[in-house]
Image (cartoon, rainbow, N blue to C red):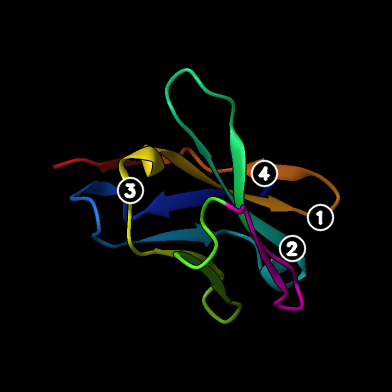
Amino acid sequence: QVQLVESGGGLVQPGGSLRLSCAASTSAFRLYIMDWYRQAPGKQRELVATITSGGNTNYADSVKGRFTISRDNAKNTVSLQMNSLKPEDTAIYYCSARRVGTYWGQGTQVTVSS
């Protein structure tokens, strides 16, 4: 069982930045593929960014050039740096860890509004 705890959400104005973090409870963190998802009200959960165990990254088209996913295997954390935020980025953001199974955090709210 892997416990994931997200932090860093909040209210930000359009054009602003936020950095989300996700702490994992497993000592095998380096072996997991880590994802950030988001779910806006009334919409399906969507994949935002992925980082593999080898450090390769992939992004949804809607966030390319604005968001950066990174991981620190020494601290068992994955982060999502979000710049140039737009109102349409408003959602609950979830991190997930996948290897054999998939584990989810509880989510953190991000609200982009003036």
* Residue 20: image location, x then y, percent: 39, 59
Q: Residues within 10 Å of mark 1 (few under 14, many from 20)?
A: few
Left or right: 56 as drawn, with respect to 105 = right
Secondary structure of residue under mark 3: loop
Marks 4 and 2 sit apart, C-alpha to C-alpha, by 10 Å
Nearer-the-camera pick, 71 or 67: 67
What residue would you read off at disc 1? 99
Which quarter shows the C terminus? top left
What residue would you read off at disc 4? 103
Upstream in the sequence, badge 3 or badge 4?
3
Secondary structure of residue under mark 4: strand
Amino acid type for the residue under numbered disc 4: Tyr
> The magenta stretch spans which residues?
50-61
In this view, the residue farthest toward the top is: 42
Marks 2 and 3 sit apart, C-alpha to C-alpha, by 30 Å
What residue would you read off at disc 3? 86
Amino acid type for the residue under numbered disc 3: Lys
Nearer-the-camera pick, 89 or 35: 89
What residue would you read off at disc 2? 32
Q: Residues within 10 Å of mark 2 (few under 14, many from 20)?
A: some
Secondary structure of residue under mark 1: loop
Q: Magenta includes 87?
A: no
Marks 3 and 4 sit apart, C-alpha to C-alpha, by 28 Å
Nearer-the-camera pick, 34 or 110: 110
Amino acid type for the residue under numbered disc 1: Arg
Q: Residues within 10 Å of mark 4 (few under 14, many from 20)?
A: some
* Residue 23: image location, x then y, percent: 49, 60
Q: Are marks 1 and 2 in contact (CB under 8 Å)?
A: yes
